[in-house]
Amino acid sequence: MRGPCRRVTHGHGSSGPLASVRDLGLDSGGVSPPAIPCPSCSVPLVTPDVLDAGTVAIPDLSVLQFRCPHCRAGAWARLGDGHVALGPVGGEPGDFDAACEPALSVRPDAGWLDCWYAGQYRRFPARIAARVA
Ligand SMILES: [Zn+2]
């Protein structure tokens, strides 16, 4: 006995833990990531520095708060799809120094800020749970 017209749909499960690790470690192109000066000490910071130093996020503003690895001062990074901008804590994100960062994409949510950068995924919790019930 076999079913009349059974459609079997499998084989496209792309949800493995290492679904598509590609081009990792290939840095032979000579393209260095954009660096933006720290608002406190003016040392140029690249996106991985900022993400590594990230602490909490303000999803409403697409802002990640981080601590500069050089001067230890707090600063804000405004993260967007394909761009990043740095400025002082509490500053106006529209005035931040910005750079193109094609490898970056972000997705804000109510309680966190999700970031993907060069195949790496990170989630930063929201600084304030601004939930008005
Ligand atoms: Zn600094």
Image (cartoon, helix red, strand yellow):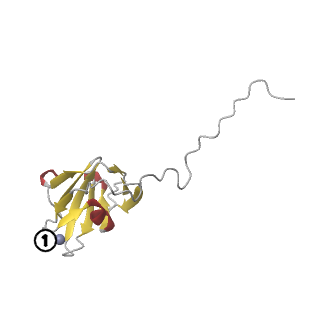
Report the residue at 54% width, 55% height from top: 17
Mark 1 surroundings: few (<14), some (14-19) or many (≥20) residues within 10 A: few
Residue 90, image x and y in percent? 17, 62
Residue 113, image x and y in percent? 35, 56
Residue 93, image x and y in percent? 17, 54
Q: Is residue 7 left or right of residue 58?
A: right
Q: Is residue 44 above or below residue 115?
A: below
Q: Is residue 11 left or right of residue 58?
A: right
Residue placed most toward the observer, 92 or 84: 84
The answer as to whether callout 1 falls within 8 Å of ligand 1 is yes
Q: Is residue 21 left or right of residue 53?
A: right
Label 1's element?
Answer: loop
Q: Is residue 56 above or below residue 131?
A: below
Residue 32, image x and y in percent? 25, 57
Q: Is residue 4 above or below residue 19?
A: above
Report the residue at 12% width, 53% height from top: 95
- Ligand number 1: quarter of image: bottom left
Residue type at numbered disc 1? Cys
Report the residue at 23% width, 59% height from top: 77
Q: What residue occupies the far right of the structure in this picture? A: 1
Q: Which residue is mark 1?
A: 41
Q: Quadrant of the N terminus?
A: top right
Q: What residue occupies the far top of the structure in this picture? A: 4
Report the residue at 56% width, 52% height from top: 16
